[in-house]
């Protein structure tokens, strides 16, 4: 088998900066999503050729959903790289429109082409060393599973399944498979035409013209944001634009809180400390500011969801500054919420209590100073009583959702969490007209944020006067503690509970 000596020093000049490091990527799954003109398919063809020239005993399988689309797409892409790089003497490329698509290198390496609709041909192909699926959004998850299984066995070099596509549907299986949560041994890359230094000016002008003629089309097909096939409650164009903007903005911190536990299971205040962790469940978009008032609202797991969520907003301007979202034990969630509230200047906390009252009850037991108070009717006496926590019902749910829709429409710059915004792209009206997540999607983050904005009125809006509580708003047992206290004790309780001076 002939050995080919290739000068790879020119690769940086021949490759877009976004993709150049991926020549050395050896993860099993390399997933390139993005808009038109981003160069993702060109790069994938280039990587195939580089591996063909520098490695031995390769049988690359290149696929699309329909076999007849291969010749004018991936086959042409690979052939163009060969000719553009002046390598035609090293490859045997079939000519004519009736010839079978099959490229061989003088060192014995092969590139095979097939459609996923050509079952018999796929069955006859063996010894595959790596795979490229182009326009993977056309495929079904069953296609991917079968290919993943076939890419097995011992090979001289690493096996890789490369996937390229435009993200036209936010409900697509590819998003759930690779983007909703990290997949082991997978690299995902988002790219747009702005990452393609080889794109000509005319092509750029065509894409950018959509900003004016069809802004939503621009976000999906130029900026490569997830598209929406149905009618959403939230404005899809505004949400997509905000997501596109935030992709270039890194959070301030990501991590969790560590602490020592007291005898009652409560985090000891003086021991609470932040721990940076790039894979953890709390994201800070803006760090705490001295004397600023904050609000922390959350949605507890329920209705088939096992995710807990929470959001912190700066109440002086309504800006989302932190988010927590994870599959927790209730006690772990409650402790992290307690710490997050303390971290943000003892924020006002209001958690949903429809499906689980545990987090709110524990915060009450731990005497967290600032908790949202609602009025509820006693089932026996029918008297209105003050209780902690937020309850969503047929009256409050439409109200808080409508309020959040208005905020997104009028002030999208307040939202900083891409995961929350992506949930909004799958939040629709069901057949009964009730706004909810599409089947297979979640709305934990949406509902948590909606609650956060709804409870703002029980926190001050100004920096100098951070607290808006008085004794009459506290539950009966705490009012009794106040009434039994002497003046010095009241002074202590007023500070501890964040009561206004006039209490």
Image: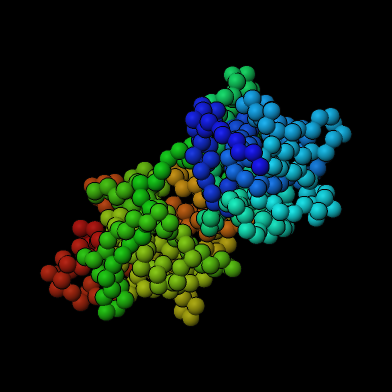
Q: Is residue 273 left or right of residue 74?
A: left
Q: Looking at the image, which residue is at 39% across and 46% down?
A: 251
Classify residue 69 by image quadrant.
Answer: top right
Can you see residue 194? Answer: no
The spot of residue 477 in percent (x, y) is 31, 76
Observer-nearest of 355 and 34: 34
Which quadrant of the figure contains the C terminus? bottom left
Q: In this view, does 326 lie above or below 249?
A: below
Outermost residue on the right side: it is 98
Q: Which residue is drawn at 24% across and 48% down?
A: 290
- State whether residue 8 is above or below residue 311: above
Instruction: Tell whether 241 sits left or right of 316.
Output: right
Q: How many labels does the image show?
A: 0
Depth check: 339 or 435 in front? 339
Q: Residue 223 appears in which quarter of the rendering?
A: top right
- Name the spot of residue 425 as percent of width and height, x first: 60, 47
Residue 230 position in % (x across, y down): 69, 46
Q: Can residue 393 be seen in this view?
A: yes
Q: Among all residues in the image, which is located at the extreme left? A: 488
Left or right of 94? Residue 253 is left
Residue 209 percent across, percent down from the top left? 61, 23
Viewer-nearest residue: 41 or 268: 41
| Residue 303: quadrant of the picture | bottom right
Tell me the quarter of the image containing the N terminus. top right
Specify the color scheme: rainbow
Residue at 70% across, 33% down: 91
- Residue positioned most to the top: 202
| Residue at 53% over, 58% down | 184
């Amino acid at each position: 088998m002939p050995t080919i000596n290739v000068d790879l020093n020119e690769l940086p000049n021949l490759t877009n900066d976004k993709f150049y490091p991926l020549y050395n990527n050896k993860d099993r799954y390399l997933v390139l999503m993005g808009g038109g003109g981003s160069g993702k398919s060109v790069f994938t063809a280039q990587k195939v050729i580089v591996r063909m020239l520098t490695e031995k005993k390769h049988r690359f399988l290149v696929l699309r959903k329909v076999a007849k689309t291969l010749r004018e797409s991936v086959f042409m892409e690979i052939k163009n790289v060969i000719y553009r790089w002046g390598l035609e003497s090293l490859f045997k490329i079939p000519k004519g429109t009736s010839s079978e698509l099959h490229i061989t290198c003088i060192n014995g390496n092969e590139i095979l082409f097939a459609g996923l609709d050509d079952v018999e041909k796929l069955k006859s192909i063996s010894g595959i060393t790596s795979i490229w699926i182009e326009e993977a959004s056309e495929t079904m998850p069953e296609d991917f599973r079968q290919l993943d299984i076939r890419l097995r066995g011992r090979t001289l070099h690493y096996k890789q399944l490369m996937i390229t596509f435009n993200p036209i549907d936010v409900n697509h299986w590819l998003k759930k498979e690779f983007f909703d949560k990290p997949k082991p041994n997978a690299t995902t890359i988002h790219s747009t035409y702005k990452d393609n230094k080889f794109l000509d000016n005319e092509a750029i002008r065509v894409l950018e013209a959509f900003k004016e003629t069809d802004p939503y089309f621009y976000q999906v097909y130029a900026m490569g944001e997830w598209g929406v096939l149905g009618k959403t409650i939230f404005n899809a164009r505004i949400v997509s634009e905000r997501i596109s903007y935030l992709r270039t903005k890194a959070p301030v911190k990501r991590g969790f809180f560590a602490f020592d536990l007291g005898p009652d299971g409560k985090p000891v205040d003086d021991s609470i400390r932040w721990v940076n962790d790039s894979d953890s469940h709390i994201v800070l978009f803006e760090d705490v500011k001295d004397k600023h008032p904050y609000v922390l609202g959350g949605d507890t797991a329920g209705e088939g969801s096992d995710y807990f969520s929470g959001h912190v907003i700066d109440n002086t301007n309504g800006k989302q500054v932190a988010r927590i979202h994870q599959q927790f034990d209730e006690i772990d969630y409650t402790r992290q919420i307690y710490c997050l509230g303390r971290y943000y200047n003892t924020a006002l906390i209001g958690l949903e209590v429809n499906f689980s009252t545990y987090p709110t009850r524990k915060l009450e037991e731990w005497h967290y100073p600032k908790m949202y108070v609602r009025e509820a009717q006693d089932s026996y006496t029918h008297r209105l009583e003050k209780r902690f926590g937020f309850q969503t019902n047929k009256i409050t749910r439409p109200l808080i959702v409508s309020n959040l829709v208005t905020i997104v429409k009028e002030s999208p710059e307040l939202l900083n969490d891409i995961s929350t915004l992506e949930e909004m792209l799958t939040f629709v009206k069901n057949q009964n007209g009730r706004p909810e997540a599409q089947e297979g999607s979640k709305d934990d983050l949406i509902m948590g944020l909606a609650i956060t904005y709804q409870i703002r009125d029980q926190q001050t809006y100004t920096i100098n006067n951070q607290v808006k509580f008085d004794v009459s708003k506290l539950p009966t047992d705490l009012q009794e503690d106040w009434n039994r206290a002497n003046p010095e004790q009241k002074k202590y309780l007023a500070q501890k509970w964040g009561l206004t001076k006039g209490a």
